Image (spheres, coloured by chain):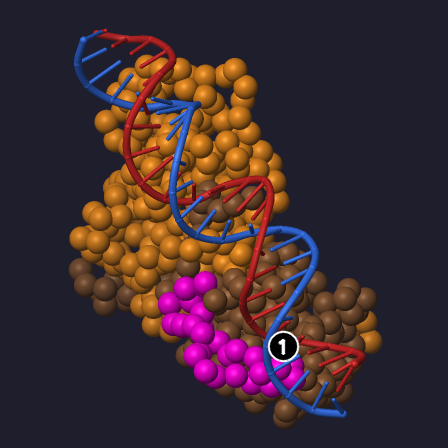
Chain colours: A orange, B brown, C blue, D red
DNA sequence: GTAATAGTGTCTTTCAGACATTATTGC
DNA sequence: GCAATAATGTCTGAAAGACACTATTAC
């Protein structure tokens, strides 16, 4: 009656099994538009897509060839989809050790003409400064960063339009309701740098107003003022530096805030 | 060069594929403790688990037999995991048309001794009043509702301890940061009924203090006061009724609230 | 000085938090 | 009247929101 006994009798072929399990990854970065000295940063959210090759290694036409898609690949039996996503990120960008998070599963019948393919989708936050040595791999003919507006005009493979839409929702909620913004910023940052990151996903007046945000940042329990430390990255006037404090996630009930 | 040509050349067996794709569902309900007339409701969050049969239909010992587990089953090739979860919910409780949501994927190698099994996990919110005609199905010898405290002391199958922990986190965040509480409540409700639901997952003083919550509920943009409509369900004094207003999700940035 | 960004002063209004008080009704 | 729940009155303090103003520095 042990699990071992039970296992011997179990027929793993009893059910139809999927034809594949893949891991896709939406790699987001935030780029500074027109970086000038002593200038307030203006940032832009971008997503990395690859152009699927028209033909595969054997010269045959590729599925959904010539369309843009999220990087991804088949998950191996000895790894999780999250590990596969990190491997894919490493292959596409050479970057390791950044924020990677699951946000959805795509399993609609017929979503992939090759068969019953389950896709586990993730997003990654890669700071601009880590994206120096991007390289294309053999499966992709082109790799490019697009703004969300540009993506609206691209031909996308499979159901990647849906997946990307959800990825943007997921990263928006994460940037605003967790301290995920820290993954786009250097370890110490000014109020205007944090503000620029948040402005890519919100128009909340508390965040967009300079005096309001400059005051507010000092009272946030998950951000620490670094007394005496300043920078002139963003202004001629030396500017106060801050850093994020490690803290378990902050849940503010919608029933207890001001409207 | 069309997708059809490409498909002919594609060998679907090139990669090892999973041995199964299952959909599990954490069925939550909130029960009123000691329901008396004219009494303020006190509620309790409960989760439905099934006891896996010691032996299967052929009399052989069952995998992880005699342990408690989330209801679930294999996803068919012609459906999504969400559809499978709703089917499973219907089989376990006879309930249809309630809130069912994906919250995670479990794919750690070795998590299931039967092979490489991917589990797509969901949770459902079922109002107490819909749970009149619960029935066990043939795969389960027992079905029971447990409090979260009771679950800590049960022997759970596979990695369901992890899955349940994440399900509780997911429903907590959803109850507090979306209007999901409406799925536990009748269409119109008093402040103390909503309060009782929220108290199952939070101790926030704005919610637990009666005068504070009674005032606050009137200023929430997603809740509407029903002028002139009252009930004596919860008190001898007729009590104001409210209802949820349909509204796209409210994201309150952690950077714009009070601490 | 000028321009740009950072940051403060100050006023008004609103709301949270606390606690007492009143209102309503079945028993 | 008593007990229980609902709801309001009222005070204090803190923070939001708005806008003017000062501070600092490269040029």
Q: Name the residue under label 1.
A: B29
> Quadrant of the image for the N terminus of chain A?
bottom right
> Quadrant of the image for the C terminus of chain A?
bottom left
Placement of A29 over or under B245, stated as above or below:
above
Q: Compare residues A195 and A156 and report the one nearer the observer.
A: A195
Residue drawn at (54%, 22%) of the image: A226
**The quarter of the displayed image where residue A235 is located:** top left
Question: Disc 1 on helix, strand or loop?
Answer: strand
Placement of A197 over or under B67, stated as above or below:
above
Placement of B187 over or under A191, stated as above or below:
below
Placement of B72 over or under C21, stated as above or below:
below
Q: Is residue B40 visible?
A: yes
**Residue B167 place in picture, x, y as percent:** 61, 64
* Chain part drawn in magenta: B219-247
Residue A209 lies left or right of residue A149; in this view the side is: right
Residue neighbourhood size for the residue with mark 1, other residues' Cα within 10 Å, grouped as few (<14), some (14–19), many (≥20): many
């Amino acid at each position: 009656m042990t699990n071992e006994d039970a296992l011997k009798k179990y027929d793993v072929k009893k059910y139809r099994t999927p034809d594949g399990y893949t891991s896709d990854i939406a790699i987001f970065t935030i780029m500074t538009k027109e970086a000038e000295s002593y200038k307030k940063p203006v940032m832009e959210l971008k997503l990395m897509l690859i152009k699927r090759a028209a033909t595969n290694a054997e010269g045959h036409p590729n599925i959904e060839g010539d369309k843009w898609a999220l990087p991804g690949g088949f998950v191996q039996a000895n790894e999780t989809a999250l590990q596969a996503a990190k491997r894919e990120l490493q292959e596409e960008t050479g970057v390791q050790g950044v924020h990677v998070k699951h946000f959805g599963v795509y399993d609609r019948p017929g979503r992939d003409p090759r068969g019953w393919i389950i896709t586990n989708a993730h997003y990654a936050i890669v700071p601009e400064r880590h994206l120096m040595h991007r390289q294309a791999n053999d499966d992709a003919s082109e790799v490019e960063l697009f703004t969300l507006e540009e993506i609206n005009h691209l031909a996308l493979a499979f159901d990647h339009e849906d997946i990307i839409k959800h990825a943007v929702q997921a990263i928006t909620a994460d940037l605003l309701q967790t301290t995920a913004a820290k993954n786009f910023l250097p370890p110490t940052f000014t109020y205007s740098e944090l503000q620029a990151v948040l402005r890519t996903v919100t128009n909340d007046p508390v965040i967009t107003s300079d005096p309001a945000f400059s005051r507010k940042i000092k009272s946030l329990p998950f951000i620490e003022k670094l007394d005496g430390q300043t920078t002139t990255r963003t202004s001629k006037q030396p500017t106060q530096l801050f850093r994020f404090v490690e803290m378990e996630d902050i849940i503010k009930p919608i029933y207890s805030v001001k409207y």
